[in-house]
Image (cartoon, rainbow, N blue to C red):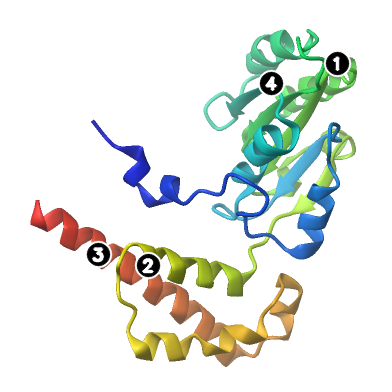
Amino acid sequence: MVDFDKIWVEKYRPATLDDIILDERILKQVKEFKEEIPNLLFVGNPGTGKTTLARIIVNDVLGCNYLYINASDESGIDTIRHNITNFAQTKSFDGKVKVVILDEADGLTTQAQAALRNTMETYAKYCRFILTANYKHKIIPAVQSRCQSLDIKPVVELAVKRCYNILKNENIKVPEEQKKSSSSLSSVTSPIYEKRLTSSKKTSLIQSCVLLASLVIMNCLKRFTKK
């Protein structure tokens, strides 16, 4: 049986707003959410924390009842008509707003998205929706207009520092030359600065991330071969 607590992506998955790595502007917006949220659309590349942020909002911020659906697995209109509608049409026992997390919503068919738009309007009194998408243009305008859209981009400096901390916690040594090659990260504090980076600095950042990933892979291989 697999012990998921030992899988790093689960072991170090952020559970609160204090843990997650976000741009300060986005983090400030999310912290303003209390007992109520608008419909949200999180857009960004895979692995940037869209789904994790959605789960933090429902578990840590709102503490509400929620339904999670991965639209890449359930992309048809029946998902909207049955699963989501059955959940959204009733009021929560504790009086709090209910939330539907629709992961990879850009995988929904156009027909399903049209039905989603109607569902969002019909049950707005009791239910909110958090959609995640890799490609915003694949979400129909009628759904986009009913959501507050947030572009989720990782802060490179903080992400690399988090990687170093994980390696340290797992007793994996980082070569000194690798630490020196990451020194340029100190000039990057927010995704808005990415456009100002020179080509050489971008290359250095990529190399740092690749080498960190290599250390993780090599460590996993060593552990596997020992068994």
At mark 2, the secondary structure is helix
**Crowd rating for badge 1 (residues with CA inside 10 Å; few <14, some 14–19, many 20+):** some
Residue at the (66%, 81%) spot, across then down:
188
Looking at marks 3 and 1 on the same chain, the residue that comes earlier in the sequence is marked by 1
Task: Name the amino acid type tagged 3.
Answer: Asn
Q: Find the distance from the CA under tag 2 to the CA under tag 1.
A: 46 Å
Task: Tell me how far mark 3 sits from mark 1, CA to CA.
Answer: 49 Å
Marks 1 and 4, Cα distance to the nearest angstrom?
15 Å
Report x, y in % for residue 219: 24, 64
Distance Cα–Cα, label 4 vs label 2: 35 Å
Left or right placement of residue 226 versus residue 195 in this view: left
Q: Which mark is residue 219?
A: 3
Question: Left or right: 164 with respect to 24?
Answer: left
Chain-order first, disc 4 or disc 3:
4
Marks 2 and 1 in Cβ contact (< 8 Å): no
> Does residue 94 lie above or below 162 as drawn?
above
User: Which image quarter holds the N terminus?
Assistant: top left
The Cα atoms of the two marked residues, 4 and 3, are separated by 39 Å
Choose mark 2 or mark 1, whichever is in front. Answer: 2
Disc 4 designates what residue?
65
204 over 44 or under it: above or below: below
Q: Nearer the viewer, mark 2 or mark 3?
A: 2
The residue that disc 2 covers is 167
